[in-house]
Image (cartoon, rainbow, N blue to C red):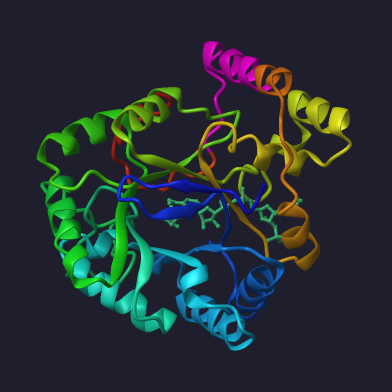
Amino acid sequence: MADQTFKLNNGLEIPAFGLGTWQGEHEKIKHAVTYALKQGYKLIDGAYCYGNEVAVGEGIKDALASGIKREDIFVVTKVWASYNTRVELGLEKSLKNLGLDYVDLFLVHWPLLLNPEGNDDKFPKLPDGSRDIIRDHNHVDTWKQMEKLLPGGKTKAIGVCNYSKRYLEQLLPHATVVPAVNQIENHPALPQKEIVELCKEKGIHIMAYSPLGSTGGPLMSAGPVVKVAEKHGVKPSTVLLSYHIPRGSTVLAKSVTPERIKENMSLIKLDDEDMKLLDDWSDELTREKKLMRFVYPPFGIDFGFPDKS
Ligand SMILES: NC(=O)C1=CN([C@@H]2O[C@H](COP(=O)(O)OP(=O)(O)OC[C@H]3O[C@@H](n4cnc5c(N)ncnc54)[C@H](OP(=O)(O)O)[C@@H]3O)[C@@H](O)[C@H]2O)C=CC1
Ligand SMILES: O=C[C@H](O)[C@@H](O)[C@@H](O)[C@H](O)C(=O)O
């Protein structure tokens, strides 16, 4: 199932499963990328902000040298918030880091602007230590710049990350190109029904991030996940990754550990009973206001997520 693909709204095929690279230290992520591609991974998800794009690029280069073809893999990167008024420069910098002449998908990482003239390239801060945010920036303007990238061919598709329903509703009336993707945190403890349904209706493909609950999260020991795993004789991680395929989403799993990289590819088909058990758990957490969001950077901005507004 890991080799399944979905079709984006511009006709491009996107793999259903890919390797995440956030928090991957240089040598480890380089080897992880090469190993994953050699094992049959087709999608690598990176970002300028992760500070490891050079290593990701080196990993890709080594895989290509072993005979894997560039056109057979799908490379994703993201414009960082301090480049949201300079997205073309952001893409150029990422391509240079990666050592590639195009990416398959370029995403807006977060819908806000960090001061492009601040005291740091990625994380400019104010004297009080808070993030240096330009508050009157309109995220729609960033999208208008993203649209202008397409004719240049340096990215085959464009999309967003971390867009709530509210933000998407602000964007869509002004979009000439509907985002191909919305990459969001997604797992049974954060089902994000509202945004997933809106994206489906508008033809925007969901990429699920932090499916295992990110580093150190409690999802792998959650009762319903363990129950489904025991039924199928697989690990909870396999259940958490497999959950996204029937939902029609692409799932990203990060690992720098070879055994896990290999194991994570073994997605299984969850049946209706499994999905119901997981969905019931989602509904229970929603009702009890116990949803779990593992990635919420300290921007101090209301992004319109129902669990955080
Ligand atoms: N657009 C955005 O804002 C965001 C995008 N992302 C993307 O999504 C990717 C995935 O999300 P991420 O937050 O990294 O978290 P994940 O949910 O993928 O979890 C990664 C953690 O789980 C561990 N792990 C991986 N496989 C297994 C396994 N089979 N058994 C036990 N532990 C395992 C990894 O350890 P180890 O590596 O040591 O093996 C790591 O600590 C990111 O790497 C990034 O590419 C993530 C967050 C935000
Ligand atoms: O992609 C992963 C996350 O969004 C990550 O990029 C942010 O959490 C970033 O580290 C931040 O602190 O703002």
> Residue 24, position in %: x, y?
59, 68
The chief SS type of the magenta part is helix
Look at the image and tell me in which quarter the C terminus lies. Answer: top left
Residue in view at x 21 percent, y 63 percent: 150
Residue in view at x 38 percent, y 69 percent: 48
Q: Quadrant of residue 31?
A: bottom right
Q: Quadrant of ligand 2?
A: bottom left
Q: Is residue 120 visible?
A: no
Q: Is residue 287 highlighted in magenta?
A: yes
Residue in view at x 66 percent, y 23 percent: 275
Which span is picked out in magenta?
A: 278-293
Q: Is residue 54 highlighted in magenta?
A: no
In the figure, is residue 182 to the left or right of 221?
A: left
In the displayed structure, would residue 77 be above or below residue 233? below
Please tell me which residue lies in front, 69 or 43. 69
> Residue 302, position in %: x, y?
29, 34
In the displayed structure, would residue 223 be above or below residue 75? above
In the figure, is residue 66 to the left or right of 228?
A: left
Q: Quadrant of residue 39?
A: bottom right
Please tell me which residue lies in front, 263 or 127. 263
- The residue lying furthest to the bottom in this view is 65
- The residue lying furthest to the front in this view is 11
Residue in view at x 21 percent, y 65 percent: 87
In the displayed structure, would residue 282 be above or below residue 25? above
> Residue 208, position in %: x, y?
51, 43
Q: Quadrant of residue 154?
A: bottom left
In the figure, is residue 240 to the left or right of 156?
A: right
Please tell me which residue lies in front, 300 or 59. 59
> Residue 163, position in %: x, y?
32, 39
